[in-house]
């Protein structure tokens, strides 16, 4: 789990950044060939990612998006590797232990329920998560 996340992080990091912090030729290629995407847009996205980094990784446990996407973007946006590894261990571990507990407690029907209703569960969770974020920003929580 953590080693796979670190592998994705490494791929994302070395595809985008050189050891001195400059962009790789691959990154420059994307800047030159994707319309309306440049270094400023990358830096804006990086700033947002680094502002919300742990929230994004926590939120990833309920989304039907492969975790590899989040690990690669963490590397591409130069997320702290140690913080990434620890949050991957905690958040993904929580996800697997929670699902295991549900299956042990309520039986194998839980797997079927999650498979059939994953989009609805993800949507409800995303809305609740956004409400919590907005309420926190407004000082209501």
Image: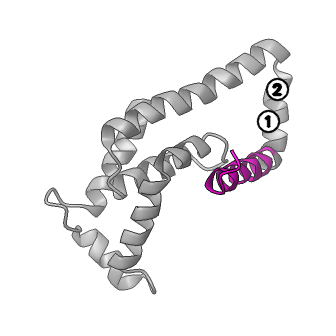
Can you name the residue that lies furthest to the top here?
104
What label does residue 54 carry, if any? none
138 displayed left or right of 47: right
The question of residue 3 being in magenta is answered with no
The residue depicted at 45 percent of the width and 86 percent of the height is 35
Per the rendering, the mark at residue 110 is 2
Tag 1: Cα neighbours inside 10 Å, few (<14), some, or many (≥20)?
A: some
How would you rate the neighbour count of disc 2 (Cα within 10 Å): few for under 14, some for 14-19, many for 20 or more? Answer: some
Residue 126 left/right relative to 55 = right
Q: Looking at this view, is 58 or 73 the one in front?
A: 58
Q: How far apart are marks 1 and 2 (CA)?
A: 6 Å
Residue drawn at x 78%, y 44% as measured from the top left: 118
9 lies above or below 76: above
- The answer to whether residue 34 is above or below residue 92 is below
Instruction: Residue at 15%, 56% (x, y): give it.
Output: 19
Answer whether residue 135 is magenta in the image.
yes
Q: Where is residue 34 in the image (x, y as percent from the top left)?
A: 43, 82
Question: Is disc 2 placed on a helix, strand or loop?
Answer: helix
The image shows residue 124, relative to residue 36, as above or below, that is above
Residue 62 lies in quadrant: top right
Magenta stretch, overall SS? helix
Res 7 quadrant in image: top left
* Residue 41 sits above or below residue 135 on the image: below
Q: Quadrant of residue 84?
A: top left
Q: Do the residues labelled 1 and 2 touch (CB within 8 Å)?
A: yes
The x and y percentages for residue 14 are 26, 55
Place of residue 130 in the rendered image (x, y in percent of width and height, measured from the top left): 69, 54
Q: Name the residue under label 1.
A: 114
Horizontal relation, residue 17 to residue 130: left or right? left
Q: Residue 113 or 102: which is nearer the viewer?
A: 102
Q: Give the range drawn in magenta.
A: 121-141
């Amino acid at each position: 789990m953590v080693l796979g996340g670190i592998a994705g992080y490494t791929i994302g990091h070395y595809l985008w950044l050189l050891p001195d912090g400059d962009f790789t030729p691959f990154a420059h290629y994307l800047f030159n060939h994707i319309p309306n995407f440049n270094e400023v847009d990358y830096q804006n996205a990086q700033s947002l990612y680094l502002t919300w980094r742990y929230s994004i990784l926590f939120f990833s446990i309920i989304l039907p998006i492969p975790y590899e996407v989040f690990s690669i973007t963490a590397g591409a946006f130069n997320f702290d590797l140690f913080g990434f590894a620890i949050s991957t261990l905690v958040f993904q571990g929580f996800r697997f232990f929670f699902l295991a507990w549900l299956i042990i407690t309520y039986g194998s029907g839980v797997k079927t329920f999650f498979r059939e209703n994953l989009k609805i569960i993800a949507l409800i969770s995303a809305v609740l998560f956004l409400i919590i974020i907005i309420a926190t920003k407004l000082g209501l929580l």
